[in-house]
Image (cartoon, rainbow, N blue to C red):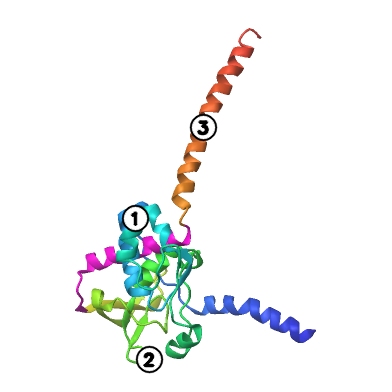
Amino acid sequence: MKQLKKLFLGALCAPLLAMASSEPVQLDRAPTEKFRDALAIQRGAQVFVNYCLNCHSASYMRYNRLKDVGLTDDQIKDNLMFAADKVGETMKVGLTRADGKLWFGAAPPDLSVIARARASADGTGADWLYTYLRGFYRDENRPTGWNNKVFANVGMPHVLYELQGEQTAKHVTVKDAHGHEKEVLEIELTKPGKLTKAEYDSTVGDLVAYLVYMGEPGAEKRRQTGLLVLLGLSVLLALAYLLKREFWKDIH
């Protein structure tokens, strides 16, 4: 029983110790205006199926949910379906968890709800993804040749490097608000890719918008329904107030 208690306490304390031992990374704010932009979500879906769906599945997302952002069945089939035959299928890949662990050291996670899973006290899951996808840099000490400023010693290679280019990192000493010196990791673009920095940031914003949408496809429809409900309740409140005044107008 004592051993079980030790294991239980260890499991509770391990994440706290890990968080205390690592310096939090300042997350960049994701372009939230894209989250309600159907065209941005469509572009993000295209980036997802071309660059992410090779290894990562999205087994809780069906292709036909993209009809909610303005695509037709034919558009989905012609432009987005490379690993399925029917638009009602989920976004699965042929890569098995065993092969993923063998090739990358860990099985690539399912990305259906990654934007919700990565939310933290320092920022939203969208902020984390936006910073992560722009934070890869060359590291010859890693098996893939890549590392990431948000996810140290990441096993995933930089699949978007042809678009972004190559970044390098260096440690610099800075002073915090209290005047204490500390080392931080700074990265800079040393080999440009096919896109400019602004274009790449916009592409990543589109991809993050799709990942956010995929985690909760019905969010926008529920938001619109909620606004209509609040509007209806406001009208009822006004009518109830007028009715109350009519009932009590002769009572002093």
Q: Which mark is residue 232?
A: 3
Image point 70% across, 79% down: which residue? 8
Image point 51% across, 32% down: which residue? 232
Q: Which mark is residue 143?
A: 2
Q: Which mark is residue 72?
A: 1
**What amino acid is labelled 3 in the image?**
Gly
* Mark toward the start of the polypeptide (3 vs 2): 2
For the question of whether residue 66 can be seen, the reply is yes
Q: Would you call the spot at circle 2 few (<14 residues within 10 Å), some (14-19), or many (20 or more)?
A: some
> Eyeballing the image, is 53 above or below 206?
below
* Mark toward the start of the polypeptide (2 vs 1): 1
> Eyeballing the image, is 100 above or below 227?
below
Q: Where does the magenta region start and end?
A: 191-216
Residue 206: in magenta span: yes
Which is nearer the eye, 98 or 194?
Answer: 98
The residue tagged with tag 3: helix, strand or loop?
helix
